[in-house]
């Protein structure tokens, strides 16, 4: 994400949090503690509130996912092992494993990192032809 967006993001975040802190939170009156004549009104108001909160939660989740992906990519860029593309890892694995019966080496390579595990598990020939009962 370009650094030019961060000041606007922080300003908007501060404004949102300030508004949420200063807002008088509506008290959700429990339906059983009110007269039967008010049950429908309270139920409608509470249902609307729940719907609104679910919508806001979804908006936060939509923002959270790309930020998490950017963070994970940044963390991986600090690790030399994370700089390798999957295709390169695939070539390393296929070059390192001495035949389909090299179970120990297959397992070692799958424990290097999450990316390596996903790549090793994606090479179906390592698992379909291997004698795992030995």
Image (tube, helix red, strand yellow):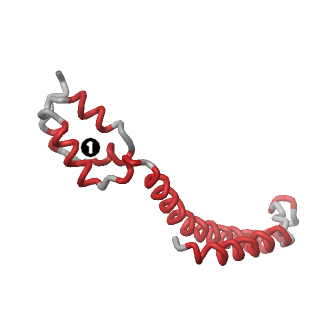
**Closer to the camera in the image, 48 or 63:** 63
**Closer to the camera in the image, 10 or 58:** 10
> Left or right of 111: which side holds 132?
left
Residue 121 place in picture, x, y as percent: 27, 44
Residue drawn at 59 percent across, 77 percent down: 4
**Closer to the camera in the image, 108 or 92:** 92
Above or below, 107 relative to 71: above
Residue drawn at 87 percent across, 64 percent down: 34
Above or below, 94 relative to 100: below
Residue 128 place in picture, x, y as percent: 15, 39
Residue 108 place in picture, x, y as percent: 30, 32
Residue drawn at 66 percent across, 78 percent down: 8
> Left or right of 74: which side holds 81?
left
Above or below, 34 relative to 87: below
Q: In what quadrant of the picture does the C terminus appear?
A: top left
Residue drawn at 86 percent across, 71 percent down: 24
> Left or right of 33: which side holds 1?
left
Indicate the secondary structure of the residue bearing disc 1.
helix
Instruction: Identify the residue under disc 1.
Output: 120
């Amino acid at each position: 994400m370009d650094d030019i967006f961060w000041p606007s993001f922080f300003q908007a975040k501060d404004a949102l949090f300030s508004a949420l802190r200063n807002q008088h939170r509506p008290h959700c009156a429990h339906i059983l503690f009110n007269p039967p004549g008010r049950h429908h009104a309270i139920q409608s108001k509470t249902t609307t509130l729940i719907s609104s909160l679910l919508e806001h939660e979804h908006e936060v989740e939509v923002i959270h996912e790309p930020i998490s992906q950017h963070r994970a990519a940044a963390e991986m860029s600090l690790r030399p092992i994370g700089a390798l593309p999957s295709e390169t890892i695939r070539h390393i694995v296929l070059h390192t494993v001495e035949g389909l019966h090299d179970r120990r080496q297959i397992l070692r390579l799958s424990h290097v990192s999450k990316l390596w595990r996903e790549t090793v598990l994606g090479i179906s020939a390592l698992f379909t032809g291997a004698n795992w009962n030995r």
